[in-house]
């Protein structure tokens, strides 16, 4: 076998292997939709993030925001297709020497072995993926069987010798058609979600001054998952165990029948930029966590409360904090309706005064333990306490707005967790002087305030506007510009506007 022929075979094999890889990836997502298979691209998300330095993770979140997960998922898809292309290249090159009619299936078997014995265990799904269910190995075997068939039909480096040209073209058209259909399937399954995440996130639907209560449709959504779990409320159970004398197993109807409370609270993501939209206010209905824990009778050695969610997310809080904060809820309703799936149906934790990372959605168990446990974000270097930092933002005007000279309405929100807001100030000269704004009394001690002011520009031209807040204890907002990693973004929200006649 001469070198030129080997290179040509490898290039052709890579092309067909990549095409077969597109088919496999599309069918993998289809199996996820129909059969509940967790796509490898999604399963490898957490192991990949686990080896990524925290500051890089933080930088990517700050830079990409909602687009981050989309970029990561597409990147993993491309990597998977390239790897399967390389497998095809190895098959095509080897087939020049090893003339066996179904050799592509042998290489497909090798690919299945790599995924099942190496990658799935790394992803936490166990040997052959059995932790995810007994059908997982079978589904993956079927996916790689399809890969092998498409590869064999497309490349056929040995079988096509002596075959008439018309037949070879026909055989080559079959995998091309399958590949095109697979791209269409991928588009149907993933593109709408990507578009929603990047171009139309929930919080982007609000314009103008923020309402006191954020509509559910516009309540910000952040998740570590590519695809969030869908939980059956009828079969869901909340387990309370660990260091307790009376373990509890609570159904949704049982939870809803217990004495409940409704509280207004503002939630904010720790990755929210200064002036960002990852902050919303709603009315949450649920049961006080301290009351639920009391029914389980914690043992004397219990010092921490650990939370686990259906998607594997975990968090924890000191038990003395839970006992001292009656506002911490296991919530099952938002704005008077059951929690939407994206917000954690059937139940989620609401922990006022802390960033949203501390409150798992799709809650499934609460365990009393003697140590801090869990912490997806903390494992990547984010702050363990996650106390909300004081922040204020402009809702109107917006960055770059052109404004007619005259009285200009200014409006926005300010938030300082459970510390409350004592003062809001704005500047129209880049921070040289500050003017007090008015603000409406908050709905509760746990929510943002809506602030307003009327500004009459001194003249025409460009102006730099800033806003800052002082919390209820008298502490001024931190004006130093910092990224959200590791403890929340700081700095004054700054916009530039142009005033003209």
Image: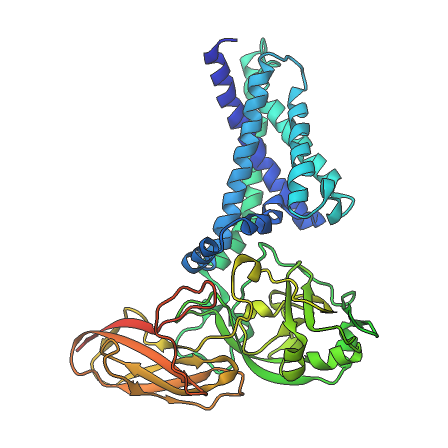
**Left or right: 118 with respect to 295?**
left
Q: Nearer the viewer, residue 481 or 268?
A: 481
What is the quadrant of residue 400 in the picture? bottom left
Residue 26 vertical placement versus 351 (above, below)? above
Task: Determine the residue located farthest toward the front in the rendered image.
Answer: 301
| Residue 210 x/y as whole percent | 44, 79
Report the residue at 57% width, 26% height from top: 88
Residue 266 vertical placement versus 19 (above, below)? below
**Left or right: 457 with respect to 380?**
left
What is the quadrant of residue 365 in the picture? bottom right
**Left or right: 217 with respect to 98?**
left
Q: Quadrant of the C terminus?
A: bottom left
Report the residue at 68% width, 24% height from top: 106
What count of labels does the image hold?
Answer: 0
Q: Is residue 243 visible?
A: yes
**Left or right: 229 with respect to 172?**
right
Q: Nearer the viewer, residue 283 or 475?
A: 475
Report the residue at 47% width, 59% height from top: 66
| Residue 425 x/y as whole percent | 33, 84
| Residue 37 x/y as whole percent | 69, 47
Report the residue at 51% width, 54% height from top: 69
Q: Is residue 377 visible?
A: no
Scheme of colours in the image: rainbow
Q: Nearer the viewer, residue 388 or 401?
A: 388
What is the quadrant of residue 320 in the picture? bottom right
| Residue 58 x/y as whole percent | 46, 58
């Amino acid at each position: 076998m001469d070198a030129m022929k080997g290179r040509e075979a490898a290039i052709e094999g890579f092309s067909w292997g990549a095409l077969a890889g597109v088919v496999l990836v599309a069918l993998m997502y289809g199996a996820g939709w129909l059969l509940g298979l967790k796509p490898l691209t999604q399963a490898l998300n957490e192991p990949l993030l686990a080896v990524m330095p925290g500051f890089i993770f933080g930088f990517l979140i700050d830079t990409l925001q909602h687009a981050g997960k989309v970029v990561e998922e597409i990147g993993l898809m491309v990597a998977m297709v390239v790897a399967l292309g390389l497998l095809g290249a190895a098959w095509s090159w080897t087939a020049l020497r090893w003339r066996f009619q179904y050799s592509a299936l042998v290489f497909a078997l090798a690919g299945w072995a790599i995924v099942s014995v190496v990658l799935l265990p790394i992803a936490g799904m166990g040997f052959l993926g059995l932790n995810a269910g007994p059908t997982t190995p079978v589904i993956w075997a079927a996916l790689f069987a399809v890969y092998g068939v498409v590869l064999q039909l497309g490349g056929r480096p040995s079988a096509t010798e002596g075959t008439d040209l018309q037949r070879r073209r026909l055989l080559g058209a079959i995998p091309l058609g399958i590949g095109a259909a697979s791209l269409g399937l991928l588009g149907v399954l993933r593109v709408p979600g990507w578009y929603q995440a990047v171009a139309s996130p929930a919080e982007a639907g609000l314009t103008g001054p923020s309402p006191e209560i954020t509509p559910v449709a516009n309540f910000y959504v952040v998740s570590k998952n590519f695809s969030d779990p869908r939980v059956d409320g009828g079969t869901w159970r909340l387990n309370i165990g660990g260091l307790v004398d009376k373990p509890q197993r609570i159904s949704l109807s049982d939870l809803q029948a217990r004495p409940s409370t409704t509280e207004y609270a503002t939630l904010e993501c720790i990755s929210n930029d200064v002036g960002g939209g990852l902050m919303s206010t709603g009315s949450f209905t649920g049961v006080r966590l301290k009351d639920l824990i009391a029914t389980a009778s914690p043992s004397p050695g219990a010092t921490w409360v650990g939370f686990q969610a259906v998607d594997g997310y975990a968090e924890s809080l000191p038990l003395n904090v839970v006992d001292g904060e009656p506002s911490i809820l296991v919530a099952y309703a938002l704005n008077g309706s059951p929690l939407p799936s994206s917000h954690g149906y059937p139940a989620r934790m609401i922990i006022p005064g802390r960033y949203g990372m501390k409150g798992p959605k799709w809650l499934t168990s609460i365990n009393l333990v003697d140590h801090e446990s869990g912490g997806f974000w903390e494992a990547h270097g984010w702050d363990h306490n996650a106390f909300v930092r004081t922040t204020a933002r402009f809702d109107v005007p917006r960055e770059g707005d052109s404004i007619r000279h005259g009285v200009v309405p200014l409006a926005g929100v300010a938030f300082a967790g459970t510390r409350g807001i004592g003062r809001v100030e704005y500047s129209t000269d880049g921070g040289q002087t500050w003017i007090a704004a008015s603000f409406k009394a908050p709905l509760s001690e746990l929510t943002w305030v809506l602030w307003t002011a009327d500004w009459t520009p001194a003249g025409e031209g460009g102006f730099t506007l800033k806003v800052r807040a002082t919390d209820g204890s008298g502490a001024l907002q931190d004006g130093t510009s910092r990224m959200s990693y590791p403890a929340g973004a700081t700095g004054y929200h700054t916009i530039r506007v142009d005033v003209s006649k």
